[in-house]
Amino acid sequence: MAPAILQTVESNWTRPYRPGIGRWLVIVWEAAALALFAWATIRQFDLTGHHVTLVGCTMAALWVVGAHRILQMGAYVGVTGLRIHGLLRSRTMHWREVAHVRLHKATHRVGPWEIESGMTVLIDRHDGSTINTELWAQGVDFHSRPGVFRAVYHELRTRHQKATS
């Protein structure tokens, strides 16, 4: 079944965890950053009148769209599959397309140093591709709640095993 058809068949997606307070901190931070950007734009170009209103409304619209996407980010489970909402795009896949749900120890190289950034959940598909999830042990949802991160990981594995057995 194609992802578009899956969306019409099942519309009951649930996120197996409550988002962390860190999301609201990110949203407030983004509001402040966009306000500063709007102020700098208005000052830089000596805007007045309707131009100021246009810049303000544009920044407010960007903030609303961005805040909505930030609040929706995460992994959602359903009877037939898994949906990953990212900041810019979402992916929906059937459980039968998923080969493994696994933990990955993420590291980043900076010159000769390797910096650990914590555990993430990855989805390996049968076609050989790997899907990054928004589930990161040090992220805004799980930073101070490691037990919740482990519970979500186990929930995804359990749902996958039940659906494919």
Image (spheres, helix red, strand yellow):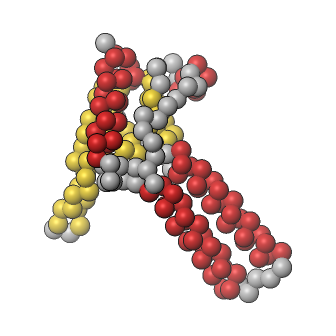
Q: Is residue 21 visible?
A: yes
Does residue 94 sit above or below 145 in this rendering? Answer: above
Q: Is residue 89 left or right of residue 42?
A: left
Q: Position of residue 160 (x, y in %)?
A: 34, 23
State the residue at coordinates (34%, 36%).
Answer: 152
Q: Is residue 63 left or right of residue 121?
A: right
State the residue at coordinates (67%, 66%).
Answer: 59
Q: Is residue 116 left or right of residue 32?
A: left
Farthest-out residue, right: 49
Q: Position of residue 110 (x, y in %)?
A: 23, 67
Q: Nearer the viewer, residue 82 or 154?
A: 154
Does residue 51 sit above or below 113 in this rendering? Answer: below
Q: Nearer the viewer, residue 85 or 110?
A: 85
Does residue 48 sit above or below 63 in this rendering? Answer: below
Location of the C terminus (image quadrant)? top left
Q: Is residue 53 left or right of residue 163?
A: right
State the residue at coordinates (62%, 60%).
Answer: 63
State the residue at coordinates (25%, 39%).
Answer: 103
Q: Position of residue 95 (x, y in %)?
A: 40, 22
Q: Is residue 124 visible?
A: no
- The image quarter in which residue 16 lies: top left
Q: Position of residue 122 (x, y in %)?
A: 32, 39
